[in-house]
Image (cartoon, grey):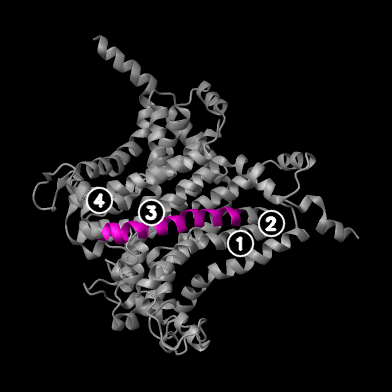
Amino acid sequence: MESRGVIRDWLKKEGSAYAFLSGYAVLFIVFIVVPVIAAVLLSFTFFDAIQTPRFVGLGNYIALLTQDDTFMKYVLPNTIQFAVLVGPGGYSLAFLLAWMLAQLPKIPRTILAVILYSPSMTAAVAMAVVWKALFSGDQTGYLNSFLMSMGLLTEPIQWLQSPQHLMTIMIIVTLWSSMGIGFLAMLAGILEISPELYEAAAIDGMSSRLQEIFYITIPSMKPQMLFGAVMALVGTFQAGAIGVTLSGTNPTPQYAGQLIVNHIEDYGFLRYEMGYAAAVSVVLLLMVLFFTRLATRLFASDT
Amino acid sequence: MTWLRRYSGVRNRGINPQGFHVSQIKFYVFLVPLAGLMLLPIVFIISNAFKPPDELFAFPPRFLVVNPTFKNFTDLFSKLTNAGIPVSRYLFNSILITVVTLAASIVVSSTAAYALSKKRFKLKKMLFAINNVALMFVPIAVTIPRFLVIERLGLLNTFWVHILPVLAMPVGLFLLKQFIDGIPDEVIEAAQVDGASDWWIYWRVILPMIRPALATIAILTFQAAWNNSEISTLYVNNESLRTLAFYLGTLTTTTTGANVVAGQGIAAAAALIMFLPNLVIFILLQSQVMSTMAHSGLK
């Protein structure tokens, strides 16, 4: 009897909150929490998608660190190179553009913001149409045609199939579409800063724009800067499919554009070594967590 | 000399100016060419979608269309895929899936955000913290376990597999919750004093007040659902349940010369159909998005 009373009290007090939460919570658990836990568990097994998983302890992780030449020689360096250039690069670019846009009146600001954001809302598959035509390997490709008419090239270059160029093109394409939701947050954050702050600083003798940025703008919008940083990081690691989309093959030519995400797909869906692929997934999730921790350290506000 | 003062006055300098000021010229000089450059691929898609075959394969290649034609679009819709499915079926699937996903995700995220923001219960702080960690979630990283979960639930090759996995969107819940935080508690207390139930408050008080945030969630969900080709690739074998984004992917991932030639006009038309709704919706709702983003900070 007593326990029933406790339950009824709890239902009365907190029941409706959980009722409101339930829809999201169920989907969140099923499609986010369970897969993450399953990935961790699978990463300790050998699993080929047909037989039951066999426990192998840390075997997959040890193999990843010691035997996977492709991972160490191509995938990891590629991912780091890509992430370092696209992550902080795209992030700084987003801040710089947001800051410039904030200095313009409303109408031109809105028009320019929509244009700068527009590449981010395009599906990767839709964009592949464009980039493939631009970087097409024969002389009808726009870039080849342009360079040849300028006399800079004598014969067409296989841009998307050549290991020397693929990574550069991947970085350009990703930067081009990196003005995502973080960029919008930063723009809104800059516009929200009260003008009195700048006036007060001007009275105190602050004169250069650079000082303004570092002592007023960025500190006043730390929460938006952090949100932007997290979105940029996730975007960077999500962007992994671009190399495969552009070159049309997985693995990419001589592993030139191979990123962790492609490595996971390679092992999981082409070789059916699910346990091993899960271990790589866990490493990827840990990398994202590590970098967001780093970003939080940088931008955490004291309040 | 009033015009001079107008264009060089203090009022129009700095952040969020009211009008033009000479100091803005340097920003235009940088931003306008850059915006032009960012726009080029999109102009290219539009132009290509209307090019007749001889212009598509002209040498040297020409960027803009000279004699626009709708042939690529009529070809697209009259085309049957290898499996004998008309492309219009893919378009219909995409539209239906996107509409259902939009409606469901707005309901699911806004109810949860209301509870997390305005209700008092023990696990509240912890649940929001978990959601914030999930902001960093990279779905591609757990493709395989996700596949197993979806398989066990019997969702493979169903209509629902396109919708359910997209609904739990940590960014959406986060943005909505931050926005609802901005609604004063007094508004809700006043309604409670009048004897309103929780659902009534949610429906009549909260929902009307969070329209800008709902518009933002709508855009994000739209992009996620409309552009999604992965679900069709991974979880659906039944051709008649796949989406336009998937079909476009099949046109572009084949690198063999013959297919590129045959499919380029069609691919451009499909790419334009994929891109335009995104752009139109964003332009219509962008002011709401900006007002939501002002609340978007992570602490």
Label 1 neighbourhood size at 10 Å, few (<14), some (14-19), many (20+)? many
> Is residue A72 in the magenta section?
yes
Residues at marks 3 and 4 on the same chain: yes
Up-down relation of residue B250 to residue B106 (above or below): below
What's the amino acid at mark 2? Leu
Give the residue at mark 2.
Answer: A104
**Residue A88: percent from the left, percent from the top?**
49, 53
Quarter of the image for the N terminus of chain A: give it: top left
**Residue A236: percent from the left, percent from the top?**
42, 55
In the image, A189: left or right of B151? right
Q: Are the two marked residues, 2 and 3, in contact with CB atoms closer than 8 angstroms?
A: no
Q: Which numbered disc, 4 or 2, marks the residue that appears first in the sequence?
A: 4
Residues at marks 4 and 2 on the same chain: yes
Q: Which numbered disc, 4 or 1, marks the residue that appears first in the sequence?
A: 4
Front label number (3 vs 4): 4
The Cα–Cα distance between marks 3 and 4, rounded to whole angstroms, is 20 Å
Identify the magenta region: A70-98
What's the amino acid at mark 4? Leu
Q: Which numbered disc, 2 or 3, marks the residue that appears first in the sequence?
A: 2
Q: Which numbered disc, 3 or 4, marks the residue that appears first in the sequence?
A: 4
The Cα–Cα distance between marks 2 and 3, rounded to whole angstroms, is 33 Å
Give the residue at mark 3.
Answer: A237
Front label number (3 vs 1): 3
Residue at disc 1, secondary structure: helix
